[in-house]
Image (spheres, coloured by chain):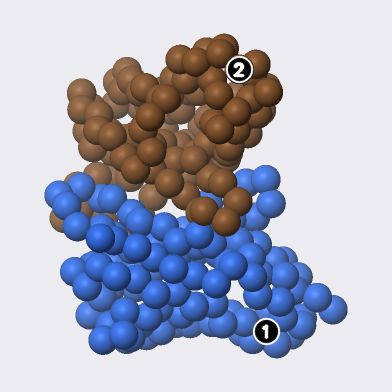
Amino acid sequence: GEDVEQSLFLSVREGDSSVINCTYTDSSSTYLYWYKQEPGAGLQLLTYIFSNMDMKQDQRLTVLLNKKDKHLSLRIADTQTGDSAIYFCAEKGTGGYNKLIFGAGTRLAVHP
Amino acid sequence: NAGVTQTPKFQVLKTGQSMTLQCAQDMNHNSMYWYRQDPGMGLRLIYYSASEGTTDKGEVPNGYNVSRLNKREFSLRLESAAPSQTSVYFCASSEGDWLVRESYGYTFGSGTRLTVV
């Protein structure tokens, strides 16, 4: 079945890079996503990557996809306190509609 | 601003009471979804509506019903609330046609925090 796994917590020092990892099971996934949830808010789409890409860079964000190992990572360069949030990995599941399977979320804590 | 609007933002219910969570989107999206979020478990799909006039069960549908009132609105009803339904509920919408703008993913509402005592 479809499953997405993430570690639950990550703590980094302000200014360092953060790397959030995710593994997924559905090899037919066409798109993989990273969402950000700030306290008390809904989820916001942060970035996405198409399955035929290995890497995507968007300002401070770098997404790496290892399709062979079904491993997705999100790197945040120069992490700031405003990056403190829960980050969700999601894959598009199989089926004829746009069903997303979410991981449990990684809580990123940024400290001085 | 365009987006997904959920009401209410907070609600406390007694066990056995009923209530309806409302969701509306103004992006002309075809598909709408209801998720619940519990600590350490991420988001779990309760029900979804791939298009107006259709609804289907997700991962955790027991204890819930839904209505896709029109293209804009998708409501979630708890007929007899139980403490296990204490959670944060999110509504989301998407284009739905996965051949078009599939990469845009979902747009989420800000959530309803429900406590059942």
Q: Position of residue A81 (x, y in %)?
A: 76, 70
The quadrant in which residue B64 appears is top left
Mark 1, residue position: A78
Q: Is residue B65 left or right of residue A68?
A: right
Placement of A67 over or under B36, stated as above or below: below
Residue at mark 1 shares a chain with residue at mark 2:
no
Does residue A104 lie above or below B18 as drawn?
below
Q: Nearer the viewer, residue A27 or A96?
A: A27
Q: Residue furthest right?
A: A112
Q: Quadrant of the N terminus of chain A?
A: bottom left
**Looking at the image, which residue is at 45% across and 61% down?**
A103
Query: In the rendered image of this protein, which colour is used for chain B?
Result: brown
In the figure, the shade used to draw chain A is blue
Question: Mark 1 belongs to which amino acid?
Answer: Asp
Q: Residue sitting at 60 percent across and 61 percent down?
A: A86
**Residue A58 location (% of width, % of height):** 48, 78
- The residue indicated by pointer 2 is B15
Left or right, residue A28 beside residue B45:
left
Q: Residue at x 29, y 61 (%)?
A: A2
Disc 1 from disc 2: Cα separation: 47 Å
